[in-house]
Image (spheres, grey):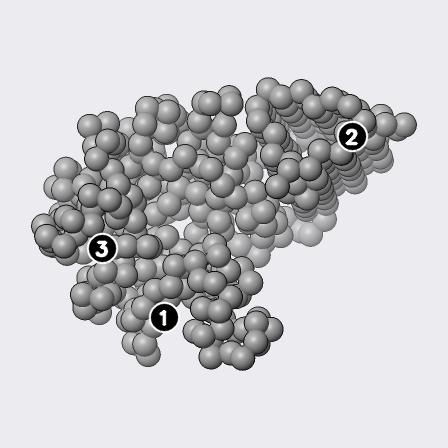
Amino acid sequence: MDRLPIVAMGLAAGRGERVRPLTLKGTNYLRSKAVIRFMGRRIIHWQLNWLGEQGVQNVLIVAKGMENRYQVKSNVGYQYHDIAVYYSPPILDALDTGSGDATLRNASYFALEQPILVFPVDSLFDLDLKNMYQMFEDTRADAVVVTAETAASHILGRYGVILTDDSCRIRAFKEKPSVEQLMTLANASSWEDTQPLPFWMNAGVYLLRPEVVKELNESPALQVMRRERLDFGKDLLPWMVKEQFKVHAYPANDVGDLGNIPDFLETMQRVLTGKMAFDWPRRPVGEPFVNRAKPRIHPTATVEQSYLGVNVQIGPYAKVRNSTLADDVTVEPYAEISESHIDEGCYIESYAHIEQALLGVMVKVLSSGDRPTVIVQYSGLGDEVTVESGVRLEGAIIDPRTHIYGDKVVEFG
């Protein structure tokens, strides 16, 4: 495999607010976004496999705080297959004022002399890095921003929009635009008119030239900005475009956001159905994805297009559809699970109905025929939560080690 002459820098400094409770090991104990499990693997392992397959041999993890740093380090170490892995020093934590600032500081600290590929640890990418690097060299761009085509309704209030010229050079950014701003960008007279139009969002992946990074580190104007905040999408990239740096866009084939519960489950659906390309065995529609060992599925149970881990047990007449069931999950008779992520060691009793939900490690869902439990509408349950029979959770976010009692509906915004 040809070596790709870049250093990859994974940004793992966030607190994972959007994807809670998966990022809570306890009520006040954070789990790094990088080590959340997605379809049987830690997210960081998915990303390192992707980078290694394309010839990247050096990865720097930029973490913040002991919890983030040492959780990643304990799961990855300093060598992952053919990739050497480094970690940002704790001494820089207190100085960090944003993703852009952290990148510049660490590039200077490690004296990086190769192009720097910056990526977030809460997304997955179908992206050809070699083609991207070739475009980077051909255009002599100062920076390249990876973009993904998406609809106006998906961008609204969540992602930044990128405006380019015919040569794919970026001319402007709009960070998390409003309805009115999107209508103006699309030259549309109504919100409905924007729906069929493609927009390009910032995917959070950047390729930077090392000499440009050095120039940015020494810029007096940026030194002033960095005292308060220097975020990539909000501050650094718009400033570079304004100052006439050559910033180009490169389209990804697909991007899967894992940073919040709805997007996490939507990305899972795309991978399960083969709509998003990753290094996972492709199986015919209707057959489950199986990881390492054959699960125990009762002949009367129904399993469709799902990932099943080791020692999964599915009882009589249970139904599992478009879902992930990690290792050691037990599903009792007549339970129904659809479009959900069920993490390791969960126990789902009979007649439970779980749809569009995310359950952490060792969640216990008690249920019975006369008191069925319902968990729906992007509910998220932290590790070791127990839900008593008859409870209905709609859009609930439940902290780890919580016990939900009673014959009642619990709704959370």
Q: 367 and 250: which one is in front?
A: 367
User: Between marks 2 and 3, how big is the CA–CA gap?
Assistant: 53 Å
Disc 1 on helix, strand or loop? Answer: strand
User: Which residue is under mark 3?
Assistant: 208
**What secondary structure is found at the residue carrying circle 2?**
loop
Q: Amino acid at mark 1?
A: Leu
Q: Residue under label 1, please give it.
A: 163
How packed is label 3: few (under 14 Cα within 10 Å), some, or many (20 or more)? Answer: many
209 to 138, vertically: above or below: above
Residue 350 visible in the displayed image: no
Q: Is residue 258 left or right of residue 378?
A: left
Q: Amino acid at mark 3?
A: Leu
Which of disc 3 and disc 2 is earlier in sequence? 3
Residue 408 circle label: 2
Whether the residues at callouts 2 and 3 have beta carbons within 8 Å, the answer is no
* In contact (CB < 8 Å): disc 2 and disc 1: no
* Mark closer to the chain start, 1 or 3: 1
